Amino acid sequence: MKQLDDAAFRATFGEPMVPVTDDEEPPFDFWDYFEEIPEDDFEGYDCSAGAVDQAWRTPDGRFEHVLVNSEEEADVFMVVVLDRDAGVVHGHRLLHLKDEYGMP
């Protein structure tokens, strides 16, 4: 399990990030990885329902960010970063949109 720091996470972005449509399936099954993420990495947030309302892809198609919703906060997600080219999970990061992007 690779918890990504801010720099490593930002290195998986591209401009502009492209939303993945509802009818697209993930490029591979990542749920086994998700289930193995250490509890401490969730910082007390509950993402165990596995609900995903958003996923974003880099313009070159290499990385896909799957945002797994938390139960407590609408703006907190466990992001699983998929490396589509390698067919592996690149890592994960708990994302607080309010804190990291100044969203209201």
Image: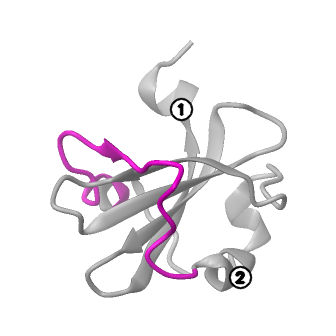
Mark 1 nearby-residue class (10 Å; few <14, some 14–19, many ≥20): some
Q: Residue furthest top?
A: 104
| Front residue of this view, candidates 56 and 35 | 56
Q: Is residue 22 magenta?
A: yes
Q: Quadrant of residue 82?
A: bottom left
Placement of the N terminus among the 4 image quadrants: bottom right
How much space separates mark 2 and mark 1, taking CA atoms? 24 Å
* Secondary-structure class at tag 2: loop
Q: Quadrant of residue 17?
A: top left
- Number of labelled discs? 2
Q: Where residue 97 is drawn, which disc sits there?
A: 1
| Front residue of this view, candidates 41 and 89 | 89
- Residue flagged by tag 2: what amino acid is it? Glu
In the depicted structure, whether residue 49 falls above or below residue 69: below
Q: Earlier in the sequence, mark 2 or mark 1?
A: 2
Image location of residue 32, percent across then percent down? 68, 85
Q: Is residue 98 left or right of residue 12?
A: right
Q: Residue at x 47, y 60 (%)?
A: 24
- Residue flagged by tag 1: what amino acid is it? Leu
Provide the residue designation for mark 2: 36
Q: Residue at x 34, y 75 (%)?
A: 83
Q: Is residue 22 left or right of residue 49?
A: left
Most common SS among magenta residues: loop
* Secondary-structure class at tag 1: helix
Mark 2 nearby-residue class (10 Å; few <14, some 14–19, many ≥20): few
Image location of residue 59, percent across then percent down? 19, 52
Q: Is residue 8 left or right of residue 27?
A: left
In the depicted structure, whether residue 82 falls above or below residue 33: above
In the depicted structure, whether residue 75 falls above or below residue 55: above
State the extent of the magenta-drawn residues as a range: 9-29
Placement of the C terminus among the 4 image quadrants: top right
Image location of residue 85, percent across then percent down? 26, 81
